[in-house]
Structure formats: C-alpha cells, structure tokens
Amino acid sequence: MIVFDQVQKSYQVGGEAVPALHPTSMTIETGEVFGIVGHSGAGKSTLVRLINRLEPSTGGRILIDDEDITHYSHAELRAFRRKVGMIFQHFNLLSSKTVADNIAFPMKLAGIYSATQIRERVDELLARVSLVDQANKYPSQLSGGQKQRVGIARALACRPTILLCDEATSALDPQTTQSVLKLLGDINRELGLTIVLITHEMDVVRRVCDRVAVMDAGRVVEMGPVSDVFLHPQHPTTRDFVFESESVDRDELQEDYQKAEGRILRLTFKGESTYQPLLGSVARESGVDFSILSGRIDHIKDTPYGQLTLSLVGGDLGLAMQAFEKADVHVEVVR
Ligand SMILES: Nc1ncnc2c1ncn2[C@@H]1O[C@H](COP(=O)(O)OP(=O)(O)OP(=O)(O)O)[C@@H](O)[C@H]1O
Ligand SMILES: [Mg+2]
C-alpha cells in the first residue's frame, strides 16, 4: 500500500519555491493498477518520482507498506529502491550493453546476487517478455516495443513489489502500445505487482487501470474507479480527456443536439446490460420514438460498457426512463 499524507513538493527556481505538487492525500492499494492522467506540467512525473524517492518531498509523509520512506537513510533507501521498478517513455537502456546485460544490470549493481542467480533470473525474464531470441542484440537493433520489453524485464529484475511507468507507451504505435499494456496487465495479475502508470491518454487508463487520479496544475482534481471517472467525469479536465479519447468534437456535438427534437438522454450500460436488446422493447412499451445521436460500445479493462446519446419524442417518457433504470442503465438528462 502506498499512502500519501498531505505530501507536497516545491522546486527551488531562482531562489523561489515553486509548487509542483500541492498537499495531496491518497492511497494506492497493493496489487492495483493505478493510473495518473493529466496535461503536460500537471505534476505527474513529480508525484511518481516521490514514490521511489528520486525526488525528496518538501512536506507530508509517504508510507509504503506502513513504513515512512521520507526519512530513510542512504542504506535504507538503497534496499528500498530494489522494491520499486521503473520504466520510461524513452526506455533509458544502456546502448553499449546487450539485452541480457541490460536486464542483469540492476542485479549486478545491487551486489547481493550470485552469477548463477543473475543468469537464471535473466533467462526467466527474457521468457516472460518474449525476447529469448533477442538476448544478445544491442538496443539499437530492436524496435520500440522490444526496447520497452527490455525496460520492463530490467525493472522486474530485483523482484520489485511496485512498478512505476512514466509514459511507458507514449513513444509506441497503437498496436505496440496494446501489446505492452497487455504485458503490464499480465504482470499485474500473475505477480500481484502494484503498478502506478502515468499517461496523457485516457484510452490507456481505460484498458489497464483499476483506479485513476486526474491531475491539473499540481493537484489531484478527480480520483476513483476507472468506470466512474471515465463514464461520469465531473471535473472539466477529466471531461477534456474523456472527450479527447473518444475523438468527440464538442462543438459539432452541440450542433447535432440542436438539430434533434424532444428530450436528449445519455444512457450508460455496464456489464451484462450492454448486451440486452433494451431499446426496442422500451420504445414499444412506452410508445417513445428515438434516434441515436452518438454512441460507443467498448470495454473498461474486462468489463463491457455502452454509452448512447438519444433524442426521444412522443410516448410516455417517464415510463421509458423507469424501464431503463430498472434494467440498471444509468440515465442522464442532457436536455
Ligand atoms: N527539477 C525541476 N526543477 C524545477 N521545476 C521542475 C523540475 N521538475 C519539474 N518541474 C516543474 O514542476 C511542474 C510539474 O512537472 P512534471 O514533470 O511533474 O509534469 P508532468 O505532469 O510529468 O508533465 P509531462 O506530461 O510533460 O511529463 C512543471 O511546472 C515543471 O516545470
Ligand atoms: Mg512527466
């Protein structure tokens, strides 16, 4: 468990303390994939670098598994950092070392593993990230996705309990992103590793995260289970991210709404209700006619969801809304 208790961070710039993280309290549970989303400069990297003490905080306490890490000595810090792996946007591999040597590097640096232990662990990790036949290549001979797999294997070398990912898929194409996210999901499930994942893409959050915090100008402005935050965003910044991920042009959407007649409702289906043939039967029973203004059916992690915006005319609207709610469909009146 990672607990932030009124943690804050300021940087000294020209003799002045400039806040990058305002006092923040939150808890990241053991074994969850926790997303942090926000625009450039929001303070995401700062927050994550406080977790492995790459940056010292300037106030508050950070507890990891009930231990306050803010006052660790150098020796304590060295042991602690083995428990926290990290991967980066630009991979940060050593170009003069082979794939296998890159993965072995943190174990050698730790100085507590035998040569046999290192060799066995490297073989195991090469298999886990599907790079067995690339072991003797150098980073420059690999694709971006392969480089990030090396980054992941290296981060796992000392058997950490926490993995920090700072924009780990931002330099990758959509298909490679998908496969790296799948690998992170597998690692989270199979090793029970806690993953803290920074991204500026809500779509990445939707695919792998259990909970998410949205950051804006050094503050967490919204936090919760991904299905709540993604399907019912409250803060303007969160709404921006969700609309962006759905490629929705809000002005166009408003125009569409103006052209539509009657009441406008947004229906959110989640889990089983996504597949029920509900619209037809509600329309028949309530006599309401509907047209679809926008819609999307997809998954949040493994849970299917659908979100439809409808305009409804005629019939008994109250009866229709009751029927939707009875079927566990969330109804929001847009107009
Ligand atoms: N070493 C530093 N010295 C001074 N200011 C810094 C330092 N590192 C970060 N900052 C400032 O702190 C704020 C937060 O930066 P941070 O790197 O955490 O943002 P971010 O959300 O990770 O952005 P990005 O998406 O661009 O990576 C920014 O205003 C940045 O300029
Ligand atoms: Mg950053």
Image (cartoon, rainbow, N blue to C red):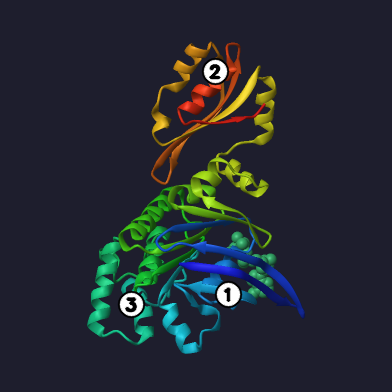
Closest to the observer, 327 or 218:
327
User: Which quadrant does the C terminus fall into?
Assistant: top right
The amino acid type of the residue labelled 3 equals Ala
Q: Is residue 42 left or right of residue 2?
A: right
Q: Is residue 40 left or right of residue 35?
A: right
- The Cα–Cα distance between marks 1 and 2, rounded to whole angstroms, is 53 Å
Q: Residue at x 42, y 31 (%)?
A: 274
The amino acid type of the residue labelled 2 equals Leu
Q: Secondary structure at mark 2?
A: helix
3 vs 33: above or below: below
Q: Is residue 188 left or right of residue 327?
A: left
Nearest-to-viewer mark from 1 and 3 = 1
Q: Which residue is mark 1?
A: 61
User: Which quadrant does the N terminus fall into?
Assistant: bottom left
The tag earlier along the polypeptide, 1 or 3, is 1
Q: Secondary structure at mark 3?
A: helix
Q: Residue at x 29, y 84 (%)?
A: 113
22 vs 182: above or below: below
- Image location of residue 90, percent across then percent down: 49, 65
- The Cα–Cα distance between marks 3 and 2, rounded to whole angstroms, is 65 Å
Kindly tell me whether residue 8 is visible in this rendering.
Answer: yes
Q: Which residue is mark 3?
A: 104
- Image location of residue 305, percent across then percent down: 45, 36
Q: Whereabouts is ligand 1, in terms of quadrant?
A: bottom right
Q: Residue at x 48, y 12 (%)?
A: 285
Nearest-to-viewer mark from 3 and 2 = 2
Which circle marks residue 47 in the picture? none
Q: Which residue is mark 2?
A: 319
Q: Residue at x 58, y 69 (%)?
A: 5
Does the beta carbon at disc 3 come under 8 Å from ligand 2? Answer: no
